[in-house]
Image (cartoon, coloured by chain):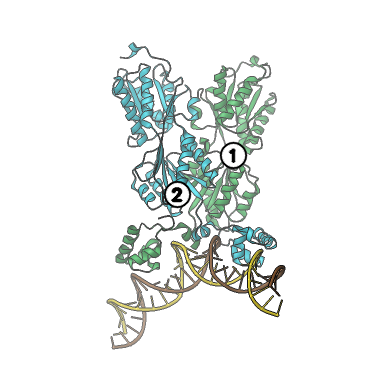
Chain colours: A green, B cyan, C brown, D yellow
DNA sequence: CTTCTCCGATGAAACGTTTCAAAGAGGTGG
DNA sequence: CCACCTCTTTGAAACGTTTCATCGGAGAAG
């Protein structure tokens, strides 16, 4: 019935012997309706299985009471944790949160954004494939609040990010402190902001400490399978040039890399130290518990949703904010103890 | 502008100097419109930043071109993998897929279902907290196609499931074959169907092989943290009664349990063998690679979405189908080699 | 008995689309 | 010059709500 023949308020009104307006009042302003009438109408609603048509309601002027979070990779627990944070805020505000998975695909992201705009959602949280996509700015300009999550922004929207350059620095500094001089970076594509920034941070630390230039093993995506592939390439490097440590753009890559190292008989951390990024829950449960750069995931989501609400409600007077959190290094077994300096070629 | 003052087709028509109907035709039946007019209208659309109002469109009669998957726990990679499968089918059909996370919370699930029905989505995929929830049957009866994923169903909807009793049997049989006689089950709450079925399967195997009755360590949720807690309880059991193996209701629990075992100095698989369920990607990357009962996750999602489409399109003539897949045991290090029979008390 | 108030219920307008019958324009053939 | 087509464009109706000005009736106050 929710299909073609779904009962409408008109049907309810007819059955209850009242006018359309009264049915509406029962639904939206029950205090204006007499007890007797309200019961009759309610009975009709139940009998017919009436379900309010949200399209009509929204058309007439109600908001959509809906928010969406467009993520980069729903299979990455980092994003579902961020989403859980956003959910808390949305719940409290009485908004429903829809998760949309762009899967690192620009087209799909574009399709989602178009649809969300057409549906007039209250706002969009997004960890974009490409934050410079003009579509995002256009969306915001036309009046849909957009908050970038985990990615910086221009003046077009608010953003909530974690300092990725600092994160890269922390990771590399840690490895350098342990005595590593030849370090690999695993991650890609390089034009993804997070990846670029983490490389920048790592290079900064290396420059400061005087290590060898970063060996970048670029990947096509940021998942476990790519980590395994990178592991093969890593192991294939001539022993004289092979780095003694790997800094991965996220924990999925690190876990894949780790798995492949074990598989190929390289010991972690003795032969290769590994640092991941995000500190997802699985990092601690890994074959060798993973040293990782932790981000305040839930907090990220919560804060982003708060900014979104502020913008959606602030209507006119609203200035975009950029909130920056600091990452923290969590040291575990995958980087082990200090290396003896002489083991470095 | 997408807010209050968003330009409508009327504005576009005025600016282009044509009628409303013509603008609509440009959008929906461009072949009916002369080249010259079409260009003028398109120019007006671009100039005004017009975005079609989906509510009005849908109200007038178009469908919503939207499908939702309500999951039990978005943080569990099992569900995001299922979702990825559903996404494939949805994409091919030109439908957008929204992910809704009920987080094992009945109220939130109910809120999502209400909203989705009001929005007149084309259909709902759901892994319900409680498949017997009358709300689900009501939803289907009122005309919104509902397909249960990973959970059985009455005659009210289609379903796509994996044989959980068989899965439990496979897991327990494996452990029994290895010589274990005292086996623990970790998982809960017990009124969740998957949990109950997996217990049933395990008990069936034990009865057949003549092991001791299953020791059930019931958990409140099915996540890593609960697995760790269960690990403490497990380790706290008097050595004489402590099981030599644990079968976990899912991989998250198994990973948490494993982590806690390692933490408390119990060796896996020597002191405790562990079997997980779902075979998520992280299972293979665990501290001790996890033996697990694999389910065809992507396939599950793809098939479910196909059934949903079939029902949504089949309109009248549609009979509900129940598709059952078989799980497969994947053996890894966490269960190790055959035990010497005499080590059992 | 009349006038005022107050409460509850009413009906029409409006939201932004899509569709469809009908009108207009321009050309062709008789 | 008229009748007839074809190709475009038009205008109105309809979708299901919410809102708001209005109306009727029942008491209360005068």
Kindly identify which residue carries mark 2: B314
Of labels 2 and 1, the one closer to you? 2
Gap between marks 2 and 1, in whole Å?
A: 33 Å
Secondary structure state at the residue bearing disc 2: helix
Q: Quadrant of the N terminus of chain B?
A: bottom right
Whether residue A228 is visible here, answered yes or no, is yes
Up the image or down, B165 lies above or below B52; here it is above
Whether residue A174 is visible here, answered yes or no, is no
User: Residue B271: x, y in percent?
Assistant: 39, 17
Number of numbered discs on residues: 2
Kindly identify which residue carries mark 1: A104
Left or right: D30 in relation to A119:
left
Chain of the residue that carries numbered disc 1 in the rendered image: A
Q: Residue at x 68, y 24 (%)?
A: A211
User: Residue A299: x, y in percent?
Assistant: 51, 41
Chain of the residue that carries numbered disc 2 in the rendered image: B
């Amino acid at each position: 019935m929710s299909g073609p023949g779904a009962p409408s308020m008109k049907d309810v009104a007819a059955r209850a012997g009242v006018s359309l307006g009264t049915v509406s009042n029962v639904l939206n302003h029950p205090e204006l309706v007499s007890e007797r009438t309200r019961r009759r109408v309610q009975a009709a609603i139940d009998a017919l299985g009436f379900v309010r048509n949200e399209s009509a309601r929204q058309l007439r002027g109600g908001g959509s009471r809906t928010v969406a979070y467009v993520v980069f990779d729903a299979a990455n627990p980092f994003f579902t944790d961020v989403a859980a944070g956003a959910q808390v805020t949305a719940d409290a505000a009485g908004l429903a949160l829809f998760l949309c998975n762009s899967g690192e695909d620009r087209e799909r992201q574009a399709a989602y954004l178009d649809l969300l705009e057409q549906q007039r959602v209250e706002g969009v949280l997004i960890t974009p494939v490409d934050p410079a996509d003009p579509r995002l700015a256009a969306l915001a300009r036309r009046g849909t609040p957009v908050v970038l999550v985990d990615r910086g922004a221009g003046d077009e929207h608010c953003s909530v990010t974690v300092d990725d350059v600092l994160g890269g620095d922390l990771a590399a500094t840690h490895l350098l402190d342990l005595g590593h001089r030849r370090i690999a970076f695993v991650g890609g594509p390089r034009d993804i902001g997070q990846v670029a920034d983490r490389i920048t941070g790592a290079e900064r630390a290396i420059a400061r400490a005087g290590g060898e230039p970063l060996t970048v093993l670029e990947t096509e995506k940021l998942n476990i399978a790519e980590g395994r592939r990178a592991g093969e390439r890593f192991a294939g490097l001539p022993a004289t040039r092979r780095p003694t440590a790997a800094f991965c753009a996220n924990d999925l890559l690190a876990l894949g890399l780790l798995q492949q190292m074990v598989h190929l008989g390289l010991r972690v951390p003795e032969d290769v130290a590994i640092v991941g990024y995000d500190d997802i829950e699985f990092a601690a449960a890994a074959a060798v518990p993973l040293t990782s750069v932790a981000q305040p995931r839930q907090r990220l989501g919560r804060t982003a949703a708060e900014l979104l609400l502020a913008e959606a409600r602030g209507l006119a007077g609203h200035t975009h904010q950029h909130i920056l959190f600091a990452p923290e290094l969590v040291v575990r077994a995958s980087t082990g103890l200090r290396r003896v300096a002489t083991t470095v070629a």
